[in-house]
């Protein structure tokens, strides 16, 4: 019996190879159509545009005059209009899904979806899956706790429509997940980059070689790790599989994916999103290749729209030219490079967690790490705890010096290194929080 697949998810490849001018034309049409509804029915954006002096539906030609939207605005609106805020275009009874942000950068934001907008989530995952090389018959294991965070909920529902067998891993220990992967011969693993490495660590402790498992593709989200070359290599070596990054956010949707040729960036799904990059301070556009803050507009989610949404992610956007894979969607070169609010100033040097991870993950002896920023004699310092595979000894002390030297060479910063005992540092299933600032009373 031939496997039935919902081919509506498999868009004609020509849609991914449209010219920049054709994509721009689609943006014009979809923005005009979306705003004709949102401007008249969405209280949140009615107020925003009204404050800007807009008395009628804005024209697409005035795009750069549209107001930006921030997460803090949405959270404040939810507090003023509990429990869901006023960024709702349709009557409440039309909303069938509820999720909330992880709360990594503050108070969690509750996000609602209608049946139509949820279908858009699933459709966007069709791009992610296809770009990574999944085919009907693949068995997708989702190592994810099934809570309010939207995480991998959409692919769990999209997978069967694409012909994949979805294997949910909620409510299981890492050992149980490993057994399930092997027992059901899973071919695709979905989880955070940190958890992929932790799961491989658990396998090693149990005498299992995860690199010989049937997993051939891993797809990751929640952290920038899968776009950090050293971390990507570690995951690929641990699982004997090809590692792919995927980018999304609860309030925006799944907007970015890596293609199978992986030329060094993450494609933005420009059929469903308008992508801009601006200077975080001046909010003026930056040129291709220059670092700036990613601004997104979702065109497929009129029920909970975000227009010119400042994501807080720092990126470098490529020129509008075809990728070696043939897609014309522009790329975020190197994926998400850092978050605006993640920057730490240590001894007068700006440093981001992802830059530290890029160095530390190159040392195969390192299993996990954790950073602490504290004040000493009025100056900010950093202590990096590094956990190795084996008990600290003479050789590990030499490694300690090498890590410190490499960090100083690459980042221009002297970071104190402390060796941690095996299994002493936290492990993460969801978003890792490896860096923290010690409270004043804990400072040295």
Image (cartoon, rainbow, N blue to C red):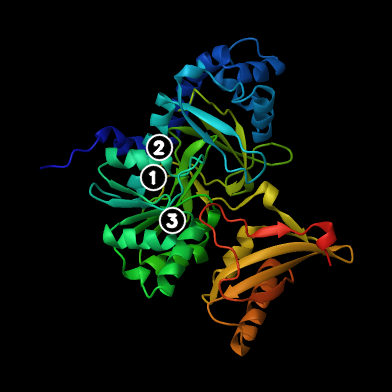
**How far apart are the alpha carbons under marks 1 and 2?**
7 Å
Q: Nearer the viewer, mark 3 or mark 1?
A: 1
Image position of 26 (left or right of 103):
left
Seen at 44% across and 68% down, the residue is 202
Residue 400 x/y as whole percent: 65, 80
Q: Residues within 10 Å of mark 3 (few under 14, many from 20)?
A: some
The image quadrant of residue 51 is top right
Q: Which of marks 2 and 3 is in front?
A: 2
**How far apart are the alpha carbons under marks 2 and 3?**
21 Å
Image position of 427 (left or right of 415):
left
Local SS, label 1: helix
Tell me: residue 170, above or below residue 308.
below
Q: Count the marks: how many?
A: 3
Seen at 27% across and 61% down, the residue is 183
Task: Answer with mark 3 or mark 1, whichever residue precedes in sequence.
Answer: 1
Tell me: residue 442, above or below residue 284.
below
Which disc is residue 124 wearing? 2
Residue 427 x/y as whole percent: 55, 62
Residue 297 x/y as whole percent: 54, 31
Local SS, label 3: loop
State yes or no: discs 1 and 2 in contact (Cβ < 8 Å). Answer: yes
**How far apart are the alpha carbons under marks 3 and 1?**
16 Å
State yes or no: discs 2 and 3 in contact (Cβ < 8 Å). Answer: no
In the rendered image, which residue does mark 1 sit on?
Answer: 128
Which disc is residue 263 wearing? 3
Seen at 70% across and 58% down, the residue is 436
Task: Answer with mark 2 or mark 3, whichever residue precedes in sequence.
Answer: 2
State yes or no: discs 3 and 1 in contact (Cβ < 8 Å). Answer: no
């Amino acid at each position: 019996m031939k496997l039935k697949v919902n081919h509506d998810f498999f868009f004609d490849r020509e849609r991914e190879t449209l010219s920049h001018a054709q994509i721009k034309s689609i943006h014009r049409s979809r923005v005009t159509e979306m705003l004709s509804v949102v401007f008249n029915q969405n209280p949140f954006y009615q107020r925003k545009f009204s404050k800007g002096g807009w008395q009628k539906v804005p024209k697409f030609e005035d795009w750069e005059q549209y107001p930006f939207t921030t997460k803090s605005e949405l959270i404040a609106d939810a507090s003023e209009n509990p429990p869901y805020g006023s960024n709702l275009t349709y009557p409440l009874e039309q909303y069938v899904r509820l999720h909330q942000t992880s709360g990594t950068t503050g108070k969690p934001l509750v996000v609602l979806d209608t049946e139509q907008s949820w279908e858009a989530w699933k459709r966007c995952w069709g791009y992610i899956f296809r770009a990574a090389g999944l085919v009907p018959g693949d068995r997708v294991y989702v190592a994810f706790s099934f809570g309010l965070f939207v995480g991998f909920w959409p692919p769990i529902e999209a997978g069967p429509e694409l012909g994949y067998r979805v294997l949910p891993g909620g409510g299981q220990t890492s050992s149980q997940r490993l057994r399930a992967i092997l027992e059901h011969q899973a071919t695709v693993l979905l989880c955070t980059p940190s958890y992929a490495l932790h799961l491989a660590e658990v396998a090693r402790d149990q005498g299992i070689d995860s690199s010989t498992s049937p997993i051939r593709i891993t797809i990751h989200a929640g952290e920038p790790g899968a776009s950090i070359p050293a971390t990507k290599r570690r995951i690929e070596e641990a699982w004997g599989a090809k590692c792919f990054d995927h980018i999304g956010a609860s309030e925006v949707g799944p907007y970015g994916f890596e293609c199978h040729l992986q030329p060094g960036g993450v494609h933005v799904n420009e059929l469903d999103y308008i992508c801009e990059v601006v200077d975080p301070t001046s909010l003026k556009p930056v040129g291709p290749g220059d670092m700036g803050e990613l601004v997104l507009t979702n065109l497929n989610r009129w029920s909970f729209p975000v227009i010119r949404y400042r994501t807080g992610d720092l990126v470098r956007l490529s020129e509008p030219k075809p990728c070696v894979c043939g897609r014309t969607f522009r790329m975020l070169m190197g994926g998400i490079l850092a978050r605006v609010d993640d920057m730490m100033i240590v001894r007068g040097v700006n440093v981001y967690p992802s830059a530290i991870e890029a160095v530390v993950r190159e040392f195969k002896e390192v299993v996990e790490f954790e950073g602490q920023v504290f004040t000493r004699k009025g100056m900010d310092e950093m202590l990096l705890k590094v956990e190795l595979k084996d008990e600290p000894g003479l050789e590990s002390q030499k490694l300690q010096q090498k890590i410190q030297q490499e960090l100083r060479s690459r980042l221009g910063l002297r970071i104190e290194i402390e060796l941690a005992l095996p299994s002493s540092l936290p492990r993460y299933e969801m978003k890792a929080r490896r860096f923290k600032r010690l409270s004043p009373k804990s400072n040295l």
